[in-house]
Image: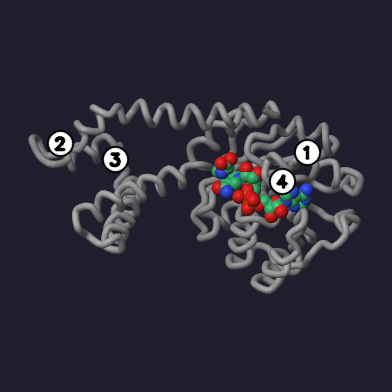
Amino acid sequence: MQKIVFMGAGSMAEALIHGWIKNEVVPANQIYVKNRSNVERLHELRNIYGVHIIEQLEEIKDADLVILAMKPKDARVAFESIAPYLSENTAILSVLAGIAIETIEKALGVRPIARVMPNTSAAIGMAASGIAFNEYVTDSQKSIYLQLLEAIGIVIEVEEDKLHAITALSGSGPAYLYYLLEAWEKIGVEFGLSKETVRKLMVQTIAGSAMMLQKVKEEPEVLRRKVTSPGGTTEAGIKALENFRFNEAIYACIKSAEARSRELARGE
Ligand SMILES: NC(=O)C1=CN([C@@H]2O[C@H](COP(=O)(O)OP(=O)(O)OC[C@H]3O[C@@H](n4cnc5c(N)ncnc54)[C@H](O)[C@@H]3O)[C@@H](O)[C@H]2O)C=CC1
Ligand SMILES: O=C(O)[C@@H]1CCC=N1
């Protein structure tokens, strides 16, 4: 793919660009960026990464791949603006949360379309992505997409319908963990520790627990029980979580995010 155009040059576009250039999967001179109005942002990306700026939509005519990376609420207007300039051979990769492949086919024509749900950890090569394809994506295109996404983390191919669940779990997931950290920092400070100390301890705790799951290959429940001494501190903490219906809260969190993804797919 010689010419890859990002429609929308926000944080997700930058995470992908950063990962591809740093890992030398796509050279900067094959990447083009376009925003709705923020030209300063385009100059910023050009200065940092050496990518090209699209000045006129006509320049997307010879693109091999157009990446849809605007917010879902801006998608309709964006589709209308680019549809006249897409050539038959241009493939589409969408990172739009909740916008169905069928909707994109209707707006941009039947062509190879891939839908990916990455997360912001792409910026440091640690994304967890799900990807789904329509029937026109060839095997060689699929392997290119998988390579592009492996450069920024891990990727799992799923049926399109499952992308709603992936959006709710790993797409939004970093935000839940940051939210948890915000709460830990607040309580740690109340106990007289500095915010920096709590952050250092808890970031390592999250990273260490994740690595344990990856390396030791035991179930989370088994690892949890190993931490929990009978009558000890962890047991007291977990009891409090249970009293506040922790499992129900997490269930409601993921269910709500999954349902919102489905609403977005219906244009609500
Ligand atoms: N931020 C995240 O954690 C994740 C975001 N996504 C998806 O990635 C997409 C982008 O999200 P962010 O990068 O966070 O948004 P963002 O707000 O940082 O960037 C979106 C950019 O699109 C531009 N834009 C809007 N309308 C446009 C148009 N018609 N033509 C060209 N550019 C246009 C805006 O000017 C803005 O710079 C969203 O659809 C979101 O659902 C997916 C996975 C994770
Ligand atoms: O909140 C959102 O809609 C997007 C999708 C996953 C993460 N951010």
- The residue at which mark 1 appears reads as 76
Q: Nearer the viewer, mark 3 or mark 1?
A: 1
| Neighbours of disc 1 within 10 Å: few (<14), some (14-19), many (20+) | few
Disc 3, SS: loop
Q: Earlier in the sequence, mark 3 or mark 4?
A: 4
| Residue 77 found in image quarter | top right
Residue that appears at 25% across and 55% down: 189
Residue type at numbered disc 4: Leu
Q: Nearer the viewer, residue 152 or 176?
A: 176
- The residue at which mark 3 appears reads as 218
Residue that appears at 85% across and 36% down: 109
Instruction: For the C terminus, give its image quadrant.
Output: top right
Q: Nearer the viewer, residue 210 or 43?
A: 43
Residue type at numbered disc 3: Glu
Q: Nearer the viewer, mark 3 or mark 4?
A: 4
Q: CA distance from mark 2 to mark 1?
A: 51 Å
Q: Which mark is residue 236?
A: 2
Q: Earlier in the sequence, mark 2 or mark 4?
A: 4
